[in-house]
Image (spheres, rainbow, N blue to C red):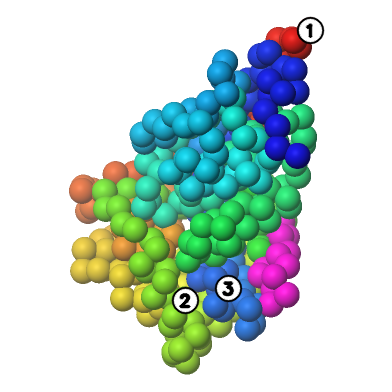
Amino acid sequence: MIESSYDQGKTDIVIISRTPLRISFVGGGSDLPAFYERERGAVVSTAINKYIYITVNPKFDRKIRASYSRTEMVDSVDELKHELIREALKMAGIDGAIEITSISDIPSQGTGLGSSSTYTVGLLNALYAYRDHLAGAERLAREACEIEIEHCGKPIGKQDQYIAAYGGLKYIRFNPDDSVFVDPIICSSEARRQLQQRLLLLYTGLTRRADDILSEQSRNSVDDEEKQASLRGMVDLAGQMWDALNCNELDGFGELLHANWMEKRRLASGISNPAIDRWYETARAHGAIGGKILGAGGGGFLLLYAPLERHEEICRALPELRPIPFHFEPQGSKLIFVEENGYAT
């Protein structure tokens, strides 16, 4: 039954969720239905300590106020133009008397860190808490996929929702029966520390719409045998990386990243461009072993793997790119603030 906080008698409850963005290392694209519905996909991905915060609190009247890059004030859920908020409210069974706001540590459009799915997972987490329900990671990820892929028709995969909900460093498999297996990567704290130290994240300043790239990639996954072979190769690379990290082996990590990027560039025309190719080759010439553009491609963040002592040289060679410090985040979406001051008599 759809109900609001005032229907339930609450006079003051504030919820804040915090949900991590992510870095995908290898296998991206095999989480698209066009591929995994025919054969299993797999990725290696990690949550990072850059977040989207969602605040939910009651509104005095029965209106809905949603504040993001713009502000909406509407009388009913169906009037909302923000499709993720609209569908999440329906999923959680809330029809009014609510205010929703968000803050992101990183620009939320077209940067390749999975922000759309992070937003959806965090919003669902906050909305369920608002209704006195505790939703687990599997439910949050599954329902975020349902909202984005089925209800909103976005041409995206599933890895972003699952890593946002579960957090940590994970090997995630996507099965033809639509199930998803999420396995932790068990490596020593020293190996994890060294891996973080060797990764360099650079903001290109380019943003792009992922939908066009992903739509083309999905079509190619069905129609083009060469593209299918590239995706199979990337799934194999994900398995190799999982095995290596579980054995605390980092020596081949950069080469696996490089091999994955060479395959990924073949999947769709907009994944790379002359500027990205130039930056990547410059980085390789100055000590980077491997890397990739994060997300669908075409812009956003350039991830590089290089010895720590070469990072400064790489940054000097790419002065137009902005380095962004980060660390791995062991936790997924979580509630960081819940305040309930009383109930109406």
Q: Quadrant of residue 245?
A: bottom right
What residue span does the magenta drawing correspond to?
Answer: 173-185
Whether 193 is among the magenta residues is no
Give the mark, 2 or 1, whose residue is nearer the N terminus.
Answer: 2
* Above or below, 31 relative to 76: below
Q: Position of residue 121 (x, y in %)?
A: 60, 45
Amino acid type at image mark 3: Pro
Amino acid type at image mark 2: Ser
Instruction: Assess whether mark 3 and mark 1 are in contact (beta carbons under 8 angstroms).
Output: no
State the mark number for residue 345. 1
Give the mark, 1 or 3, whose residue is nearer the N terminus.
Answer: 3
Q: CA distance from mark 2 to mark 1?
A: 55 Å
Q: CA distance from mark 1 to mark 3?
A: 50 Å
Residue at 31%, 70% (x, y): give it: 270
**Which residue lies most toward the bottom here?**
225
**Residue that carries the numbered disc 2 in the rendered image:** 218
Residue at 42%, 32% (x, y): give it: 72
State the mark number for residue 320. none
State the mark number for residue 33. 3
Residue 230 vs residue 135, the one in the foreground? 135
Residue at 27%, 63% (x, y): give it: 276
Residue at 37%, 48% (x, y): give it: 109
Whether 179 is among the magenta residues is yes
Instruction: Assess whether mark 2 and mark 3 are in contact (beta carbons under 8 angstroms).
Output: yes
